[in-house]
Image: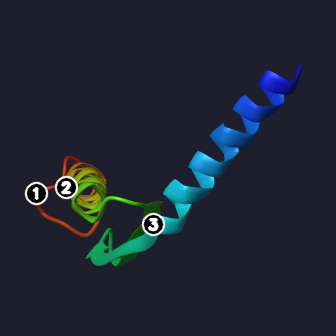
């Protein structure tokens, strides 16, 4: 039982250590006739930028497909 408690404590301390190095990463843009934004909490700034780039690319893809404000939209 003591070994399980120590293992759990070590896991919790590792999570706290990872969280201590993390930071908020944000991105704002315009799409769908309004302002859009995304934010995430991550320790790796390079990976956070890549993830936010993918989120914004998807928002612009959706805008291009379903926007009532664009002539090239499928609507």
Tell me the SS state at disc 2.
Answer: helix
Q: Nearer the viewer, mark 3 or mark 2?
A: 3
Label 2 packing within 10 angstroms: few (<14), some (14-19), many (20+):
some
Tell me the SS state at disc 3.
Answer: helix
Q: CA distance from mark 1 to mark 2?
A: 7 Å
Q: Are marks 1 and 2 in contact (CB under 8 Å)?
A: yes
At which x and y percent is residue 55? 31, 55
Colouring scheme applied when the structure was drawn: rainbow
At which x and y percent is residue 75? 26, 50
Residue 60 placement, left or right of 42 = left
Q: Are marks 3 and 1 in contact (CB under 8 Å)?
A: no
**What residue is pinned by disc 3?**
21
Residue 39 placement, left or right of 3 = left
Q: Is residue 20 above or below residue 35?
A: above
**What residue is pinned by disc 2?**
64
User: Farthest residue in the front direction?
Assistant: 2
At which x and y percent is residue 49? 24, 63
**Residue drawn at x 50%, y 55% as measured from the top left:** 18
Viewer-nearest residue: 61 or 48: 48
Examine the image and state in which quarter residue 69 appears.
Answer: bottom left
Q: CA distance from mark 3 to mark 2?
A: 37 Å
Label 1 packing within 10 angstroms: few (<14), some (14-19), many (20+):
few
| N-terminal label among 1 and 2 | 2
Number of numbered labels in the structure image:
3
């Amino acid at each position: 039982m003591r070994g399980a408690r120590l293992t759990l404590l070590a896991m919790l301390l590792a999570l706290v250590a990872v969280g201590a190095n993390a930071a908020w990463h944000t991105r704002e843009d315009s799409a769908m006739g309004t302002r859009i934004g995304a934010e995430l909490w991550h320790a790796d700034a390079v990976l956070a930028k890549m993830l936010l780039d993918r989120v914004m690319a998807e928002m612009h893809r959706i805008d291009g497909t379903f926007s009532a404000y664009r002539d090239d939209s499928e609507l």
